[in-house]
């Protein structure tokens, strides 16, 4: 009885050690990914948004400034344009800009906007 239990306990320990290693690895990957997506958002903003809103988000002419928006406000606005539920006299412009963005891209862009 004991003889059969022993190896099982050993196997269990091995699995949990390996699980810990896998978890650590995943956390490192996640951290790297999170960092990369912030970089990605900054680049994305420069390429796709700065032309109208300005690199520092100060807006220009009839384009509203983004500076001072909280991440939640920017995210809600972008989601609203994507889902076509947000009103605005020039909403068609933004609907075109965000229509192919994923939730993650919108979140990353909103975080970037909040940091402008
Ligand atoms: C072609 C010009 C143009 C581009 C490119 C553009 N925007 Fe806009 N954006 C506008 C205009 C115009 C509005 C106002 C739309 C309206 O009337 O609702 C606006 C509105 C917004 C708003 C809402 C602001 C508020 O206070 O209500 C956010 C947030 C925003 N844009 C973010 C972005 C992001 C992020 C990008 C890049 C992915 C981007 N915009 C690209 C022109 C542009």
Image (cartoon, rainbow, N blue to C red):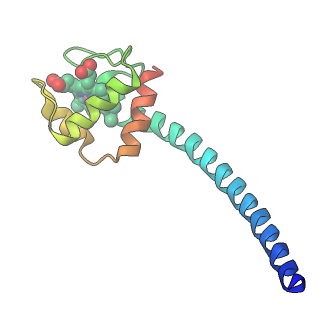
Answer yes or no: is residue 51 visible.
Answer: no
Look at the picture and state if 62 lies above or below 76.
above
Residue 25: x, y in percent? Answer: 70, 56
Look at the picture and state if 4 lies above or below 81.
below
Quarter of the picture holding the C terminus = top left
Look at the picture and state if 64 lies above or below 4.
above
Task: Say which quarter of the image contains residue 78.
Answer: top left
Answer yes or no: is residue 91 visible.
Answer: yes
Could you tell me which residue is drawn at 36 percent across and 18 percent down?
69
- Given residues 58 and 10, the one toward you in this image is 10
Residue 26: x, y in percent? Answer: 65, 55
Look at the picture and state if 60 lies above or below 100.
above
Residue 84: x, y in percent? Answer: 15, 39
Could you tell me which residue is drawn at 13 percent across and 24 percent down?
88
Q: Can you tell me which quadrant of the image ligand 1 is in?
A: top left
Total marks drawn? 0
- Given residues 63 and 103, the one toward you in this image is 103
Among all residues in the image, which is located at the extreme left? 89
Q: Is residue 96 left or right of residue 12?
A: left
Task: Say which quarter of the image contains residue 82.
Answer: top left
Among all residues in the image, which is located at the extreme front? 1
Q: Is residue 26 left or right of residue 80?
A: right
Quarter of the picture holding the N terminus = bottom right
Could you tell me which residue is drawn at 59 percent across and 40 percent down?
35
Q: Is residue 11 left or right of residue 66?
A: right
Residue 112: x, y in percent? Answer: 45, 29
């Amino acid at each position: 009885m004991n003889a059969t239990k022993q190896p099982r306990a050993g196997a269990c320990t091995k699995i949990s050690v390996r699980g810990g290693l896998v978890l650590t690895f995943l956390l490192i990957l996640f951290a790297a990914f999170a960092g990369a997506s912030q970089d990605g958002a900054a680049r994305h903003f420069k390429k796709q948004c700065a032309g109208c809103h300005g690199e520092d988000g100060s807006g220009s002419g009839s384009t509203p400034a983004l500076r001072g928006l909280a991440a939640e406000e920017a995210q809600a606005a972008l989601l609203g344009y994507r889902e076509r539920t947000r009103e605005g006299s020039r909403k068609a412009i933004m609907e075109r800009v965000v229509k192919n963005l994923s939730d993650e891209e919108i979140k990353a862009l909103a975080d970037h906007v909040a940091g402008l």
